[in-house]
C-alpha cells in the first residue's frame, strides 16, 4: 500500500507492507525522515492516532507527522494524554461555540465588502475552527473596516501550525496576492485548543494592511495600527474577545508571540514581494514587543 507522509512543508512517498500496524509505520517514518519514533504524533483521516497496535487502514492515503520541537518524549506523551482526556470537554465547548460564535445580523453583513468563503483544515474540531473564523468574518469592527476601505477578500482560511513552524520562527498570518486569500493561525501549536480571539484579530489587521502595502515600512505599520484601533472603535457594542465557553483554551499563545514588532529591518519578518506576505515571530521580535509594552506602561 502506498502512502504519502507529510511533515512540515515536505511530502514523502513510502510503501507500507500489507498488515502493517501504525507502530510499524512509525518505524518506517523514523527511517525515512529521521524523526524519532517517540517524538512522532500522527494524524490520519482527520483523527489523531492513539492506538498504534491497530492496522493501517487501506483507505488511508496520507499521514501527517507532527514532531516534537525542543521537547522530549515525556512532553509528547503528556500532550497526547491531554488530547485523549479532553474529548468530553470539547463536546461541551462545541455547544458553547454555537452561541459564542453565532452570526449577528448587521447592516455590514449584507455589504459586498467582506470575506467570501471560509476554509478550515481537516482536523479534529473543525466545526469550532469554522465558527471562530465565521465570528471573525462577522465581527462588527472588522465589517466596518472592510466597508470603509472597500475591501473584499474571497477566502478566509485556517493556517496549519505544523507546516508553518520552525525552530526559529512561527508564521501567524499570510496574505496571498494582496487580498485574494488570507490565512490565519488559530490553533495552538499542539492542536489542543484555539488562540485568543483578540490576538487573532490583531493578526488579521496586519494581513489586511498587506492589501495596500507589501513592504513592512512606516506606511504599512501606520495602516496596521490604524486598523487595530478601528476594529475596536467601529464596533458599537465593543469587542469582548470571547473564547470557547468563555475561557482561555490557548496553551502557549501570548500577546508577545502574536504581535510582531514594527521593524522592517528585522530578518525574521518574512515577505515575498507580489505573492505572499507573512508575519513571523522570533525570540528577538518577542523581546522587542515586550520592551515596547513596558515602555507604554511607563508612559
Image (cartoon, grey):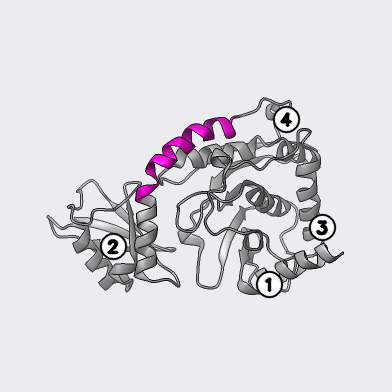
Q: Please report whichever mark, 1 or 4, sits nearer to the chain's N-terminal start.
A: 4
The quarter holding residue 298 reads bottom right
Measured in 3D between alpha carbons, the distance from the residue under mark 1 to the one under mark 3, in whole angstroms, is: 21 Å
Image side of residue 112 versus residue 120, left or right = right
Name the quadrant of the C terminus.
bottom right
Which region is colored magenta? 84-102
Q: Secondary structure at mark 3?
A: helix
Q: Are marks 2 and 4 in contact (CB under 8 Å)?
A: no
Question: According to the image, label 2 marks what residue?
Answer: 13
Q: Which residue is mark 3?
A: 222
Q: Look at the numbered disc 4 and give the secondary structure of its residue.
A: helix
Badge 3: residue crowd in 10 Å (few <14, some 14–19, many ≥20): few
Q: Position of residue 207 (x, y in %)?
A: 67, 53
In this view, the residue in front, 73 or 123, is 73
For residue 287, the mark is 1
Q: Which mark sits nearer the N-terminus, 4 or 3?
A: 4
| Element marked by disc 2 | strand
Q: Residues within 10 Å of mark 1 (few under 14, many from 20)?
A: some
Check residue 40 in the rendering and tell me which mark sits there, or answer none.
none
Q: In the image, residue 286 lies at what x, y percent?
A: 66, 69
| Mark 4 crowd level (few <14, some 14–19, many ≥20, 10 Å Cα) | some
**Does the CB distance between marks 4 and 3 fall below 8 Å?**
no
Q: Earlier in the sequence, mark 3 or mark 2?
A: 2
Question: Image check: 148 left or right of 197?
Answer: right
Q: Which residue is mark 4?
A: 108
Task: Say if 262 sits above or below 153 in the image.
Answer: below
Amino acid at each position: 500500500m502506498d502512502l504519502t507522509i507529510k511533515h512540515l512543508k515536505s511530502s514523502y512517498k513510502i510503501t507500507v507492507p500489507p498488515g502493517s500496524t501504525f507502530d510499524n509505520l512509525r518505524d518506517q517514518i523514523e527511517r525515512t525522515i529521521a524523526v524519532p519514533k517517540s517524538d512522532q504524533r500522527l494524524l490520519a483521516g482527520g483523527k489523531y492516532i492513539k492506538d498504534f497496535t491497530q492496522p493501517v487502514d487501506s483507505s488511508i492515503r496520507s499521514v501527517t507527522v507532527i514532531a516534537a520541537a525542543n521537547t522530549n518524549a515525556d512532553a509528547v506523551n503528556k500532550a497526547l494524554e491531554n488530547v485523549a482526556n479532553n474529548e468530553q470537554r470539547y463536546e461541551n465547548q462545541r455547544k458553547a461555540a454555537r452561541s459564542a460564535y453565532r452570526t449577528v445580523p448587521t447592516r455590514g453583513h449584507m455589504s459586498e465588502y467582506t470575506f467570501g468563503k471560509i476554509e478550515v483544515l481537516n482536523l479534529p474540531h473543525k466545526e469550532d475552527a469554522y465558527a471562530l473564523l465565521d465570528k471573525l468574518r462577522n465581527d462588527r469592527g472588522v465589517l466596518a473596516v472592510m466597508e470603509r476601505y472597500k475591501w473584499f477578500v474571497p477566502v478566509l482560511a485556517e493556517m496549519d501550525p505544523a507546516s508553518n513552524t520552525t525552530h526559529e520562527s512561527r508564521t501567524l498570518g499570510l496574505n496571498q496576492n494582496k487580498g485574494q486569500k488570507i490565512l490565519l493561525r488559530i490553533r495552538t501549536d499542539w492542536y489542543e485548543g484555539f488562540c485568543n480571539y483578540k490576538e487573532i484579530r490583531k493578526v488579521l489587521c496586519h494581513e489586511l494592511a498587506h492589501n495596500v502595502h507589501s513592504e513592512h515600512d512606516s506606511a504599512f505599520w501606520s495602516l496596521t495600527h490604524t486598523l487595530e484601533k478601528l476594529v475596536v472603535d467601529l464596533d458599537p457594542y465593543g469587542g469582548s474577545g470571547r473564547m470557547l465557553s468563555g475561557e482561555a483554551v490557548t496553551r502557549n499563545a501570548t500577546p508577545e508571540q502574536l504581535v510582531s514588532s514594527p521593524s522592517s529591518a528585522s530578518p525574521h519578518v518574512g515577505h515575498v514581494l507580489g505573492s505572499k506576505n507573512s508575519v513571523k515571530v522570533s525570540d528577538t521580535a518577542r523581546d522587542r514587543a515586550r520592551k515596547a509594552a513596558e515602555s507604554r506602561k511607563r508612559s
